[in-house]
Amino acid sequence: MDRDKAPGPDGFTIAVFQDCWDVIKEDLVRVFDEFHRSGIINQSTNASFIVLLPKKSMAKKISDYRPISLITSLYKIIAKVLVGRLRGILHETIHSTQGAFVQGRQILDAVLIANEIVDEKKRSGEEGVVFKIDFEKAYDHVSWDFLDHVMEKKGFNPKWRKWIRGCLSSVSFAILVNGNAKGWVKASRGLRQGDPLSPFLFTIVADVLSRMLLRAEERNVFEGFRVGRNRTRVSHLQFADDTIFFSSTREEDLLTLKSVLVVFGHISGLKVNLDKSNIYGINLGQDHLHRLAELLDCKASGGPYSTWVFLWVGIPSLDNSHSILSHSYALLLLSLFKIPAFVAGRIERLQRDFLWSGVGEGKRDHLVSWDVVCKSKMKGGLGLGRISLRNSALLGKWLWRYPREGSALWHQVILSIYGSHSNGWDANTVVRWSHRCPWKAIAQVFQDFSKFTRFMVGNGDRIRFWEDLWWGDQSLGVRFPRLLRVVMDKNIPISSILGSTCPFSWNFNFRRNLSDSEIEEVESLMQSLDHIHLSPSVPDKRSWSLSSLGLFTVKSFFLALSQISGLPSVFPTKLVWNSQVPFKIKSFVWLVAHKKLTKVDWVPPRSICDMLSTNFNGFGSSKRGIILWQAACITLLWVVFKRIPLNVIHLDWLAACNSIGLA
């Protein structure tokens, strides 16, 4: 929990509870015990201040503001404990089309699915529509009775439902006007923005819409998109209150969808705001699209940028196209799409200009090459890294997740569209069509990604004996190329060759009789595998060789792609960057290490005495150069003196100073 978030009516931040824990812990435990027993929260404990934050510049109407609740810290602690329990079981009860606030699901899953199925629909030439809806004040209109009923149907026991009801029914509000609380209102429905429980409770409510739509599909009164060779059905995607539907152009299907939304609105309290809802056509003429929009009482959208709205489900709307350059949007883009080379070049040029010239300070020389700047600090750079390599590292995360999330909807969609790779772990990485589909960019990273994967043998059913890296530093096919050339099946799994028990059966299945030299290689191979043990009850696993835990990290992949391992260090990194001196001195020393100071000739000193000598012209023979040189040396030596014990330095400081006349 954030220690310093704005306090609610109690005036306390979370930091107060953390810092004063020894004083208040017994009282806090009593509050929890009372809540656990009765399910009741004192009304003053659950009071809230409402602050209206403008959604856009020049906000005038009340609808232009977003209400945020400032909640007491005591209630936040109670709610956070409930969230911790709730988070662990939501994945069991929330449908796979919901991507928000469910463990194991990520914001970009829905974006990937939407892009892929729309792209496939366009390639096939089939007509279809995408309908994006907007719930009117979604959190504010949730019916408590409906939420309680849904939780009962999902199997939450009466005590849990009583706790949730206690958290909701004791809510009261006061609106902050110029910092003063005005009037108190008791809530009768809705969820608070800022309440840790609200996103999870809303997800439970929104899941009912998914179930209603799935029931309509089962009764064949609504048809979503059918994707790929497996004809995987995708009719909708959700991310919290963002929902998009995929439908055929049949009027009957759209009328069914409209009816489902109306009924859901009546029972849940969530009303669709048709003024902000849009329908998009795929391989569809504008006239036809407008007729379907009239049928749904919504707006028809078209044009070259209209796809942004539904291809980015779950990502907040952009007020203007320039907002996409913000850090969070840029990171999301780099995590799913390949950045064009010219865009990466422009961004890096902006970075270079800002690094050396700042803002409005005129153009200055770029003293250190960009390749050096992009290296890690351990290797003498500033750790910025190439954008294209960071892009590849982020895309590699999908390749790691794919075999580990076999039941996820995005996995099923990718498998249906592209099929399986010959290695049995990945999706097919040969993508010959549209440059827009995300998987094409992800597949291009596969060759680099596979260099750093290893396999841990369990039952041997999924690991290829010859092609996969599971024993030693090279695959057996690389170590024994002559044997690989004469086997019948290069993709045969380990278990098919060795069998499941010792002694191994050694069913190599060669195409012909072996020569004497090949027989010797087989004997060498068999001897090297004497200590292999298969575990029939343990599945095979893939691990990441760059991590001691065997788990993929974007950072490790990025560093590997940057090819920085093994390069000689330029200067003592920790001494410079971790030293207790102002940053401008650190920057100065960094330039000194690279011999890139302007308008001076660098001559490396031979010893510490040389460095301190007033006769050494490190920065030239001018008075300014001599003073500058001494200041630099003194700064460096002071850092060394402060951070390294004298008994480790092995230097007679007094003798050194005497020899140059400084003592």
Image (cartoon, rainbow, N blue to C red):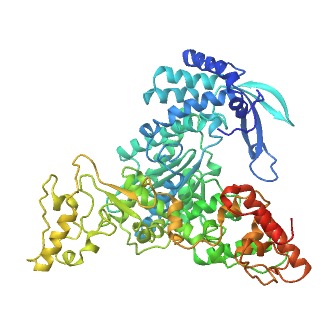
Is residue 225 at least partly visible in the picture? no
Residue visible at 50% across and 48% down in the picture: 99
Which quarter of the figure has residue 512? bottom left
- Whether residue 54 is situated above or below residue 344 in the rendered picture: above
Q: Quick check: 655 above or below 147?
A: below
Location of residue 290 (image quadrant): bottom right
Q: Is residue 324 left or right of residue 338?
A: right
> Foreground residue, 235 or 87?
87
Q: Position of residue 623 (x, y in %)?
A: 91, 79
Vertical placement of residue 457 versus 662, above or below: above
> Within the image, what quadrant is residue 177 found in?
top right
Give 576 or 156, whichever is nearer the viewer: 576
Q: Quadrant of the N terminus?
A: top right
Residue 91 on image: x %, y %: 44, 40
State the image coordinates of residue 87 (x, y, percent, origin top left): 51, 37
Q: Residue at x 61, y 27 (%)?
A: 78
